[in-house]
């Protein structure tokens, strides 16, 4: 995924296993340090004390499976690319100048600067001043390095993990970041965070404890696979316990507030003007500015987010220089809106940056909690009504490609007839899946003719499926079931940009006799209805990862399907749950890929989503004062933390009057 503003966050790579990508919103026990190993000498000592031989044999021995690993980072599979003590990441410019301002836009409204609130809508980048124990690498999937934690310790079984915190870590008010803050943050997210997150994590991570001021230990439940447990807790945002406890009634995590609290990150909130702009400024006393994981990063003195009522106003704001960097997600704008003088002069640059991430799984999602969507024939009919080819050529300037897979164009995409490990795991599901899945190619997005919005051949197939599903045409030309209920479908939207795309699709549904309506509501109402699962269909994008793990439970798992905002389909299927277990339990990358392909194949066969489009590049337009490293990493554009302002170019723009 590209770096672009999305509600209250900038989304980056689709690492589903950490809390920070999800952006959702244990008890103390004395334990010895995990760095102390029990070896043969210790066993002799115990024998001399007269303990039983059985007890000695039960102790973990040096070189056994329970030997404790100490590391400066963690990789899900294989070895870390960067050794201990590395100077900086390869993809940064270590000499990048500091200064200037990044100004970007957001469309809509906000009424809170608490990114974890269950009410209202949080401001863009509201979570950016909170740091975590580990930070991800942008050029190696599934690899993380110490940020607040300088190292971590864990047994090969990964039954637990200890993080050793950097003594110099500080919150923006100058107070130390301690193990108590980490434990408090973990527990606060369980008590006041989103229900779907809290219930899942509580079962998997039963206990967290502070061993001393700079050591925190997390224990993992034996009932769940170990994969991504360490990165899950390593990605937890760290809050100041003292700040929250100073006024617990008015500083709840689940309530909106304009005071975001204090974090330990490089930027702090400068000003939040409701529905107008948000400004963050660099903390001159940021504790981590000289860490190797931060060299060449966080180069702006300020980050400003300008709010606009709609996409048209936002585009005009960019042309006028009200803000100066625009990650583009509208094909019409990219194709037609950059013909103004500043582009012709070279003052504004249109960049297409290769994106090595798994494309986000965009599509129109059906709410399976509604009984009318239970028949798969009906769901297939709804898929057939969408004409991607006409939409792409007529409305999107031919810039997109049609998506079929949840892991499109990656090694995790299901292709051909299943074989090997993929076939084994599918066969093990028995009658939980359609047996045709074992001998067929995966479901592909259907092809349509691009000459007109309604492909008549596909609509005829769709109407036949509706007939078979019991939705027959009545005397008034409307689809109804045996009980006389008319088939009604509301497509809920909050985006005028998508409205022009969804409109022709809704017209095709109407042409088949469905009482289909497109309902665009304001941002606050849309957010509320999405949380309450009060919709028939919505547009949604699943952020998939090259190393998928526990986040899949929230996207597709039954455990929280009735209320998880990350599972808009309300999907609950035992076969899917079993396949997610296999993915999470994978011990090798090859095993992970095979299990993910099996899951991809079954998800596509469920037909709960109308697949739409994807890109393999990031579109970013910017005024020419910005520069970025020549070797940008494959998994992040680095807009927020790798780019910098070229002072000479900025001076040229201001001297010419192009910018104020």
Image (cartoon, rainbow, N blue to C red):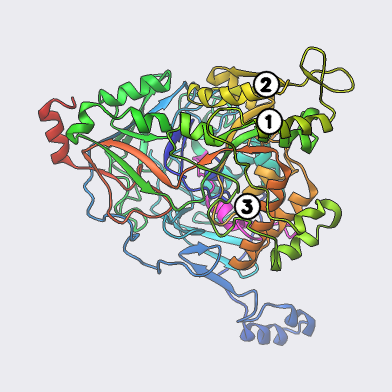
Q: Classify mark 1: residues with Cα within 10 Å, few (<14), some (14-19) or many (20+).
A: many
* Residue 459 marker: 1
Label located before the other in sequence (3 or 2)? 3
Task: Report, in whole angstroms, how far the alpha carbon at label 3 lies from the one at label 2.
Answer: 57 Å
Label 2–label 1 contact, CB within 8 A: yes
Q: Is residue 569 left or right of residue 338?
A: right
Above or below — where is 401 with respect to 249? Answer: below
Identify the image quadrant of residue 593.
Answer: bottom right
Q: From the image, which quarter does the C terminus lie in?
A: top left
Q: Is residue 299 left or right of residue 163?
A: left
Q: Position of residue 93 (x, y in %)?
A: 26, 54
Secondary structure type for disc 3: strand
40 or 389: which is nearer to us?
Answer: 389
Task: Report, in whole angstroms, how far the alpha carbon at label 2 lies from the one at label 1.
Answer: 9 Å
Secondary structure type for disc 1: helix
Q: Residue furthest left?
A: 655
Task: Please check the rendered image and state whether residue 107 is part of the magenta-colored stretch, yes or no.
Answer: no
Label located before the other in sequence (3 or 1)? 3
Label located before the other in sequence (2 or 1)? 1
Q: Position of residue 373 (x, y in %)?
A: 76, 31
* Residue 511 marker: 2
Task: Please check the rendered image and state whether residue 239 is part of the magenta-colored stretch, yes or no.
Answer: yes
């Amino acid at each position: 995924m590209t770096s672009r503003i999305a509600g209250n966050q900038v989304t980056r790579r689709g690492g589903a296993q950490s809390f920070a990508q999800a952006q959702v919103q244990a008890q103390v026990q004395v334990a010895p340090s995990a760095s102390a190993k029990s070896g043969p000498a210790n066993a002799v000592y115990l024998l001399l004390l007269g303990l039983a031989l059985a007890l000695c044999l039960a102790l973990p021995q040096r070189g056994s499976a329970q030997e404790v690993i100490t590391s400066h980072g963690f990789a899900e599979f294989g070895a870390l690319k960067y050794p201990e003590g590395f100077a900086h990441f390869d993809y940064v410019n270590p000499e990048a100048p500091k200064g200037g301002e990044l100004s970007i836009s957001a469309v809509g409204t906000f009424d809170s600067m608490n990114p974890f609130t269950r009410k209202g809508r949080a401001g863009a980048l509201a979570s950016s001043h909170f740091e975590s124990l580990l930070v991800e690498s942008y050029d190696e999937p599934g690899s993380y390095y110490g940020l607040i934690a300088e190292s971590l310790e864990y047994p090969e079984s990964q039954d637990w993990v200890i993080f050793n915190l950097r003594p110099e870590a500080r919150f923006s008010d100058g107070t130390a970041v301690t193990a108590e803050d980490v434990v408090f943050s973990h527990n606060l997210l369980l008590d006041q965070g989103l229900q779907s997150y809290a219930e899942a994590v509580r079962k998997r991570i039963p206990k967290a404890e502070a061993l001393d001021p700079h050591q925190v230990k997390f224990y993992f439940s034996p009932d769940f696979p170990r994969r991504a447990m360490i990165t899950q807790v390593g990605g937890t945002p760290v809050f100041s316990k003292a700040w929250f406890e100073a006024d617990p009634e008015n500083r709840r995590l689940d309530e909106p507030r304009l005071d975001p609290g204090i974090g330990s990150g490089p930027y702090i909130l400068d000003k939040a003007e409701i529905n107008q702009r948000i400004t963050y400024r660099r903390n001159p006393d940021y504790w981590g500015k000289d860490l190797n994981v931060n060299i060449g990063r966080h180069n702006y003195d300020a980050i400003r987010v300008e709010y606009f009522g709609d996409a048209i106003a936002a585009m005009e704001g960019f042309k006028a220089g009200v803000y100066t960097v625009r990650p583009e997600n509208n094909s019409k704008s990219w194709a037609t809106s950059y013909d103004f003088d500043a582009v012709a002069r070279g003052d504004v640059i249109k960049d297409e940056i290769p994106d090595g991430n798994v494309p986000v799984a965009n599509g129109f999602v059906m709410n399976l909690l509604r009984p009318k969507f239970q028949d798969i024939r009906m769901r297939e009919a709804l898929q057939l009504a969408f004409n991607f080819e006409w939409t792409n050529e007529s409305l999107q300037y031919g810039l997109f490609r049609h998506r079929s897979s949840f892991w499109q164009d990656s090694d995790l995409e299901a292709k051909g007839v299943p074989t090997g490990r993929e076939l084994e795991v599918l066969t093990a599901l028995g009658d939980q899946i359609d047996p045709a899945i074992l001998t067929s190619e995966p479901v592909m997005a259907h092809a349509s003719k691009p000459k007109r919005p309604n492909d008549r051949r596909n609509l005829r197939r769709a109407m036949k499926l509706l007939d078979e599903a019991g939705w027959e045409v009545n005397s008034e030309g409307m689809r109804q079931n045996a009980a006389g209920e008319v088939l009604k479908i509301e497509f809920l939207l909050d985006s005028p940009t998508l409205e022009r795309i969804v409109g022709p699709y809704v017209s095709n549904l109407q042409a088949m006799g469905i009482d289909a309506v497109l309902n665009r509501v304001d941002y606050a109402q849309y957010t509320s209805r999405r949380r309450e699962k009060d919709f028939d269909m919505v547009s949604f994008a699943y952020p998939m990862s090259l190393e998928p793990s526990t986040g899949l439970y929230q996207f597709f798992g039954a455990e929280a399907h009735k209320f998880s905002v990350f599972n808009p389909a309300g999907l609950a299927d035992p076969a899917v749950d079993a396949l997610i277990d296999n993915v999470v339990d994978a011990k090798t990358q090859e095993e992970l890929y095979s299990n993910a392909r099996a899951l991809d194949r079954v998800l596509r066969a469920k037909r709960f989503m109308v697949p739409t489009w994807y890109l393999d590049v990031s579109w970013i337009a910017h005024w020419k004062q910005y520069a970025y490293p020549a070797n940008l990493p494959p998994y992040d554009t680095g807009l927020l933390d790798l780019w910098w302002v070229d002072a000479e170019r900025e001076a040229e723009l201001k001297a010419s009057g192009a910018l104020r």
